[in-house]
Amino acid sequence: MNVRPERQDSNEDSARGALGSTLRYLREKAGKSLSQLAEDTNYDKSYLYRLEAAERISKRPVMEDLDTYYETGDLLVRLWKLARMEVFKDQYKAFMRLEATANVMHMYTPGVPGLLQTEAYARVVLSLWQVQPDEEALEEQVVARIGRQELLHRKPKPVIRVIIDEAALRRTVADPKIWDDQLLHLVYSAAQPTITIQVLPFSAGVHPLNRGSLHLLWQPDGTSVAYLEGNTSGELLEESDDIHKFRLAYDRVRDVALTPQDSVMFIERVLEELRS
């Protein structure tokens, strides 16, 4: 089907805007009002409007349903994939803003979280993503990552609980001094009254958070969000049902993790093993 969507608004040059304008074009071409489309598809009228206005991104099944409805093959799914990647970048910026003001943070990370990394360790980790060596770009990334740690010294300080997978503590770096300092920094961090660290041991087996990192953030006004992060993408979740689901998943992982005291002892044993 040959579709030439009209331009819509200030989002017209974005993939998200293109998806929204395409949805509107297809509806109008089909001679349907939003009310009629809502009745035909069983999706809420206001929800469909927000999709067309590029105010939100749907889940993939919605685009699959609309592709079927409009008989457009996988056009909307392909546009959705582009819009989703674009939104990931915007969502990470939103996550950073929320992280900077959160007063309670719960995290699960398969690696050492950026907030608890030493500068030297952060430099090693970030350099792994460079295809071509670029010292200036690398230093900018290191400064940005370490700069995030300023929130640890806010007044009042945020209350932070971090669950770190045992795998993170077993993957050393080439320079023993850098790794030694990083493990010591974790022990030091765990001693701070507002930071709790738990280790998820291999013996805990499979768990519901084994697909990446999870951040749960609570703001002073009581609102909360969940942020899921993989190697190359992230997703900010603000719907109460999604947040509740991941909060329960986090609690299940916390229940099988080592206690805070045992976790510190575990990290200290790893240090001893490395030094022996």
Image (spheres, grey):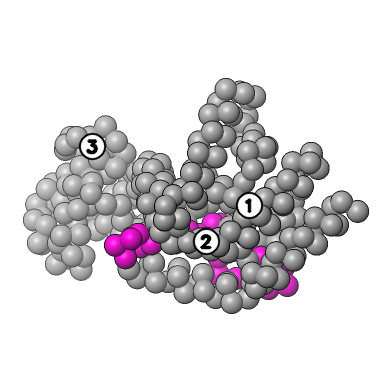
- The quadrant of the picture occupied by the N terminus is top left
Q: Which element carries disc 3, helix, strand or loop?
A: loop
Rounded to the nearest whole Å, what is the CA distance between mark 1 and mark 2? Answer: 18 Å
Residue of label 2: 194
C-beta proximity under 8 Å, tags 3 and 2 = no
Residue type at tag 2: Thr
Q: Residue at x 51, y 45 (%)?
A: 149
221 drawn magenta: yes
Residue 157 lies left or right of residue 12; in this view the side is: right
Name the spot of residue 30 as percent of width and height, x first.
13, 51
Rounded to the nearest whole Å, what is the CA distance between mark 1 and mark 3? Answer: 37 Å
Q: Residue at x 79, y 41 (%)?
A: 177
Name the spot of residue 59 as percent of width and height, x first.
35, 58
**Which stretch did the figure color magenta?**
199-225
272 drawn magenta: no
Residue of label 3: 11
> Would you say residue 211 is visible in this rendering?
no
Foreground disc of the pair 1, 3: 1
Q: Is residue 173 above or below residue 130?
A: below
Q: Which element carries disc 1, helix, strand or loop?
A: loop
Residue type at tag 1: Val
Residue of label 1: 112
Q: Is residue 226 above or below residue 230?
A: below
Q: Residues within 10 Å of mark 1 (few under 14, many from 20)?
A: many
